[in-house]
Amino acid sequence: MVLAELGGQIASALQKMSNVTIIDEKALNECLKEITRALLHSDVSFPLVREMQNNIKKIVNLEELAAGHNKRRIIEQAIFSELCKMLDPGKPAFAPKKAKPSVVMFVGLQGAGKTTTCTKYAYYHKKKGYKPALVCADTFRAGAFDQLKQNATKAGIPFYGSYTESDPVKIAVEGVDTFKKESCDLIIVDTSGRHKQEATLFEEMRQVAEATKPDLVIFVMDSSIGQAAFDQAQAFKQSVAVGAVIITKMDGHAKGGGALSAVAATKSPVIFIGTGEHMDEFEVFDVKPFVSRLLGMGDWSGFVDKLQDVVPKNQQPELLEKLSQGTFTLRIMYDQFQNILNMGPLKEVFSMLPGGAAEMMPKGHEKESQAKVKRYMTMMDSMTNEELDSSNPKVFNESRMMRIARGSGRLVREVMEMLEEYKRLAKIWSKMKGLKIPKSGDMSALSRNMNAQHMSKVLPPQMLKQIGGMGGLQSLMKQMGSSKDMMGMFGGKDK
């Protein structure tokens, strides 16, 4: 994952500071020096990094802090909020409304994945009940219309373009008018990729914007662009009213810090991130959960939301009831493995669990982990109903394990390994016992019902220690004023 290395380096700097006996100016400067080095190495622009460093020093005035203050926690909070500020311009992007036609224009550099992103954006909104349509106003790149046509057909989205017309403005206007007559409520205009040095293409972009009068202009940016991101993003902002940013190729190995610079240059929020080639590898971007995952804190609410998408609505109350009872059977494990496989790439899913990615998804072993989950499910397919519904692993004597191994074509050792994994997950599940279940049985309300006690059980011990134990967690919740902000810090979000 792009920025994972950056997150690791920042988390490492915070960890080193946690191990220092006395937090003084020297310890703070050492921590900030490491974070600054990590940000610059990840291609975040120098002025941004310098501003962040100065802001943290202003917030954390060690001389003025009275005795008894948890200095570590105040420094961590300052770093967290400054990273959030760097990614959040403080203004929401335009949101399309159903049954009311909205025009969204996509702009960006060549090769940033703009055409694919247009289709992903349309497909995402189609699943939410919108009626999207795609217009190909890219007459500069050979094969652009063919690519859009192929993508749109696969996603079942109407499209408009021309093989003979060379005027992009004319195509854009005709396409928008056509789809307005067909009562489409989200009309997406794909434009030619351009470079900040290409004045003629920028002029063409301005003309398309003037002719179609888009409600929102989205700047699509490749996460691997590097230090050039700030200048390129600024050039687009000066030509058209960029209102939002989508960052692509977040599944690669690029440093990705340029993405942070693009937000600062356009002063526009990131609304989505592309995490792969496939149509559903497209995530809504939310600042606090993103920074939480970046620092290894997880995104509990994001995990619940993803789970909600794959768990049928009528099964949600039953699953939540089992969660609150703390009862975990092999059948529940099987069902949740099935849900997790449907949620998308495993690495992405496990990074949402606080401390989960490191334990369950070793770096570079995503395919192995996926194969292991499928292997466990094959073994469970060879179990009886009695075995699947039991919450007592002691029922698995030697003869039962041999039967399961024979039935699934695996070794007894592998069956034992699967049962050890079950015990580990049962232990985590049991920590949620007594969680207050929403009356509606709706999973999206689950993250809002997490109190300090449950938060302390879900967080990894090392992180809880950094916060200052249970007492530190409770005072942090009071200090931040609401569970909404607290859940935000640890990856949740209030709906």
Image (cartoon, grey):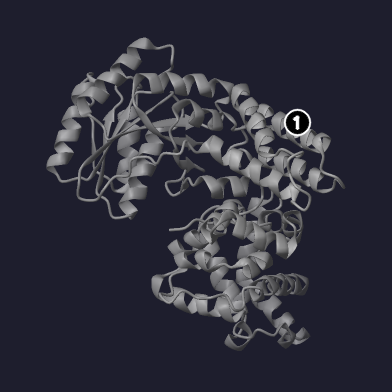
Q: Quadrant of residue 29?
A: top right
Q: Is residue 417 left or right of residue 201?
A: right
Q: Is residue 461 above or below residue 109?
A: below
Q: Specify the farthest residue to the left.
A: 181
In front: 242, or 485?
A: 485
In front: 50, or 195?
A: 50
Circle 1: element type: helix
Q: Is residue 39 above or below residue 234?
A: below
Q: To which residue does mark 1 refer?
A: 33
Q: Measured from the top left, where is residue 326 in percent x and y?
A: 62, 79
Q: Is residue 233 above or below residue 55?
A: above
Q: Measured from the top left, where is residue 125 in percent x and y?
A: 33, 49
Q: Measured from the top left, where is residue 469 in percent x and y?
A: 74, 62
Residue at image position (20%, 50%) is: 99
Q: Quadrant of residue 478?
A: bottom right
Q: Amino acid at mark 1?
A: Lys
Residue at image position (55%, 32%) is: 260
Q: Quadrant of the C terminus?
A: bottom left
In front: 20, or 270?
A: 20
**Residue 250 visible here:** no
Other residues around mark 1 within 10 Å, as few (<14) / some (14–19) / many (≥20) = some
**Residue 438 visible here:** yes
> For the image shown, how many numbered marks are present on the structure?
1
Q: Specify the farthest residue to the right.
A: 21
Q: Quadrant of residue 180?
A: top left
Q: Is residue 426 left or right of residue 221?
A: right
In front: 95, or 111?
A: 95
Q: Measured from the top left, where is residue 1 in percent x and y?
A: 61, 42
